[in-house]
Image (cartoon, rainbow, N blue to C red):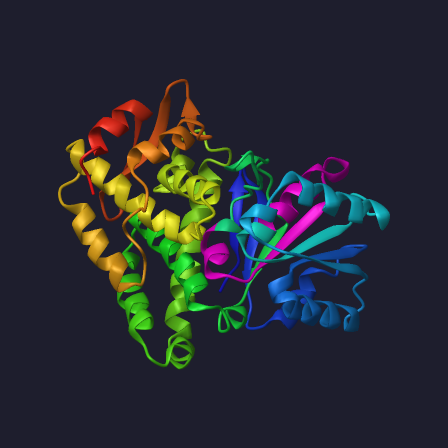
Amino acid sequence: MEEIRIISEGKVLSRVYSGTGLASLVQYLTPYRKVFIFCDMAVEHYGRIIEKEAVKAGVNIVDLQTVIATESDKSIYTVLSICNWLMDHNADRNDMLLSVGGGITTDMGGFAASIFKRGIHFAYVPTTLLSQVDAAIGGKTGVNFEDYKNMLGVIRQPDFTYECQEVLASLPKRDFNSGVAEMLKTFIIEDNGNYDKAVTLLSSLNKASRRVELLTSLKEELQELIEAAAAVKAGVVSRDQFESGERRKLNLGHTFAHAIEAEALRREMDITHGEAVAMGMIMAAQLSEKLGIADSISERMTEEFIACGLPTGAPFSIEDLAEAMGKDKKAEGDKIHFILPVKVGEVIIKDLSVEEVKELLKDVK
């Protein structure tokens, strides 16, 4: 594909590149004096491939550091350990921190790079579908704090994001499906004819008994959808980098999702971010219906999400989620910016209090 750009006031802030394999990434590392690779331990083999190819091409790879990338490890303490590592190796503002992994890894690496010496160069190699269509694009970085999602962080654009399907082939089905939720979310916000295409392809993958083979045969169609989702997000971020207006729409389902994740963390339950987003989008659709904004959209979304392998019913009541929702980053005073679907391809922003939402959803199952 042609590169996707995030542009603000005529200036290119970040680029998204797509390649056929990890070796092609090396050309984008050559301008930097030193490169540090920060890698999710689960995909260290990809980090080692990048390291080997980069060294062959004459890139100065100083070190490769791995991390356990779980929500409980996504903390300020991990970010400080990255800063200590960079300090130990005399990293300076001309150097590059390359984060290889899913959204947790890129969030932490981007945050560390943004605050170390007030900012060094950084880039991402997202290795999950979720991070390729959402988390690694747009400049949001952050870590969890006091059991609440992404409470500490900054918005700063990476120099570039490099995406390739090579890393998706070995992705476990559950992790792949987390990305499915974010892809569908993107097309509910801005469709351009892609939502139905995505449901058709992703439901086929979900039902397939020989999933890896089907994924390989459909790689061009999947790549088109990944690029379309990335382009939607890049376009929205270009128009509203710091989330003062339109970019808030990208949070469809996320106010509920972050509360679900916080409650799951508190109860030591295993719910992925994508699963929480799927549940949160259904709750947002139900809220939209209760307010008379949409008609029967939650039924359609539920049916299609299930076909794509996504959970649709949150295991907590609205009362269970209320406290975490009240601490949502999108809160202003006693109101929260809820993103509500009108139909596929159209969402609106509605300011509601937690108490109003509790009352509206109290009887919804």
Q: Is residue 55 left or right of residue 229?
A: right
Position in image of residue 5 (x %, y %) = 52, 50
| Residue 30 visible in this rendered orientation of the protein | yes
Q: Residue furthest top?
A: 333
Q: Nearer the viewer, residue 30 or 254?
A: 254
Q: Residue drawn at (43%, 29%), measured in percent from left and top?
A: 330
Q: Is residue 130 above or below residue 43?
A: above
Q: Residue drawn at (24%, 49%), measured in percent from left and top?
A: 344
Position in image of residue 317 (x %, y %) = 29, 38
Q: Quadrant of residue 280?
A: top left
Q: Is residue 74 above or below residue 194?
A: above
Q: Nearer the viewer, residue 322 or 211?
A: 322
Q: Quadrant of residue 255?
A: top left
Q: Which residues are magenta?
A: 106-134
Q: Residue drawn at (40%, 35%), measured in percent from left and top?
A: 248
Would residue 129 be counted in the magenta stretch? yes
Position in image of residue 47 (x %, y %) = 67, 66
Would residue 61 be counted in the magenta stretch? no
Q: Main secondary structure of the magenta part?
A: helix
Q: Is residue 209 above or below residue 244?
A: below
Q: Is residue 229 left or right of residue 16?
A: left
